Amino acid sequence: MAENVGKIVDPSPMMKQYLEIKEQYKDCVLFYRLGDFYELFYEDAIEISQVLDLTLTGKNCGQDERAPMCGVPYHAADSYIAKLVGLGYKVAICEQLSDPVKGKMVPRDVVRVITAGTVTDESMLSESKNNFIMCLFLEGEKLSVAYCDITTGEMNLCHFDGALESSFSDLLNRVGPAEIIGNARAKEFYNSLAILRLGVYPKFEELLEVCFSKDKAQENVEKQFGTNAVKVFELDKNRQDVPAVGGLMQYLFDTQKRSLGNILKITKIKNDQYMTIDSNTRRNLELVESIRERKKYGSLLWLMDNTKTSMGARRFRAMFDQPLQNATEINDRLDAVEELSKNLILRDKLCVSLTRVRDVERICGKIAYGSANPADLLGLKASLQEIPNLHAALQNTKSKKLRQIFDGLVAFPEIVELLEKAINVDATSSTKEGKYIRAGFNEELDNLRNAKEIAEKEYRKLEEFERQETGIKNLKIKMNNVFGLFIEVPAGQKEFVPLRYTRKQTIANAERYTTPDLKAIENKLFGSDEEALKLEEKLYKMLLEFLCKHLSSFSDVAKTMANLDALLSLAVHFKMQQSD
């Protein structure tokens, strides 16, 4: 690894740890946590310092020359990571797994690998477009393709057993994946596609064949979707399906290293379900992006998009990327749009409610990963609160699609009530300062937060008790930042001090003592802030674990609201065109 930057004579313990971890992630840029910085060393530092315009320095690491080094502050790392991922790099995040202890090596390990298809940070994602990672498994003349958006939990599966190049090229155009992986044969097939000459598709990353072995792939499928997943999702009909899904899950397990609890279902996509549109036609029609700047602005999608939610925007874009072919489905959609376009009051009610709905699909992803912040949970609460309003507005609708949406709008009054009681209405995305759990939710937490006031009352009460118990009328309980709480007794009355008192300090005219009771009050007073933060974190983690149990239901209702938003957008555009 380091042969190009000097011979390592006797690597320091820290650098030995770095080299061992880097050896496991040779294909990644390793962000190695040292205190308040992520540091990069050797070839990583030389290359990335130029890419990110960072100052290249050096560090003595037990070799005959200083090791090239550069770094970024950990609190500002997201923007640097986003740029690297956007340029096609894989970034391995190596964190300190415990607080530093003097004289001991801090244990470190990679907690996540960030790639173009597995980013979850909002700053790296488009609200109105899915971020898919696609896995291909080619065997013989048959191809299965699994593609997933880990932020929304959407997992799709498509199988081809003929006309592979044209069929897959159309899927590639429709889905627009951010990252593509697969087996060796799939790589050969992919790299031979004529469509790649356009230069807009990701490079193919080949995975080890063991990822696609029958036993390993099925193990991964069952680990994620349950022991009956093969039968439930009919993955036994094509022998390439299980390796495609299982290989993708192996890659996600290896890179994410945390729960993927929002990926719950596999949706099979039929080859003839959507209209085939070649890449040139898509470009010339400017369906979702303009020819010149390749942006949404100026496209047909931009002209017609009146969605109110991020979920609806993604669903609306999918309608443009994947035009329906089935006449029944097309007519069902048109019936719903017609009904909405003819009912102004209904449209207005739905628009008002959907404006208050947040991105429930991606909030579910954050809950599954354990990264949802208090502001996200407030967004979830606000969204769930609108379900009864949407349900009531659709009560008298007649079209098939709207009736399906009406039936799918299941309310969660208990969850709404829980979030109302648990999360402070002023909570932000940060949890560092605490105070995001609402007062009254947990008595112990309330007591810790009010510890100073409570402690003052308790030690005043204890002061009166000790005066009466000892007969020392001038006895006082005082406090300072150095010695904390103490009982102060005038020097002339120290003969009356009981044996249960422990001397703490002697001053000119008095003696200072403590007792077990006073020590308990002192611990409550001075340790309350830290204890409150710890308890708040514990309660919040328990809340996220509880919400995880409802992710499937949240995901279903999110898709229902997204479909409603997309249909409403079409109806609004239709009425706008009529008025013109």
Image: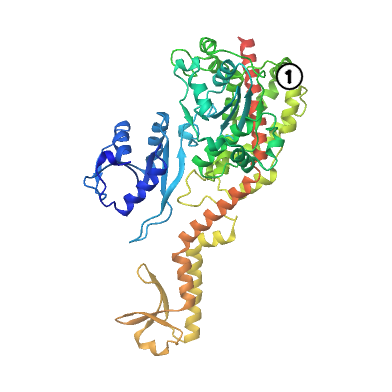
Going by the numbered disc 1, the residue's amino acid type is Asp
Residue tagged 1: 332
SS at mark 1? helix
Residue at the location (45% across, 79% down)? 515
Where on the picture, by quarter, is residue 7? Answer: top left
Q: Is residue 101 visible?
A: yes
Where on the picture, by quarter, is residue 100? Answer: bottom left
Nearer to me, 17 or 489: 17
Q: Is residue 356 visible?
A: no
Q: Residue furthest bottom?
A: 495
**Is residue 515 positioned above or below 133 on the image?**
below
Q: Residue furthest front?
A: 140
In the rendered view, does 191 fall on the left or right side of 441? left
> In which quadrant of the rendered image does the N terminus lie?
top left
In the rendered view, does 422 fall on the left or right side of 533? right
Nearer to me, 502 or 335: 335
Residue at the location (55% across, 59% down)? 446
Residue at the location (41% across, 46% down)? 94
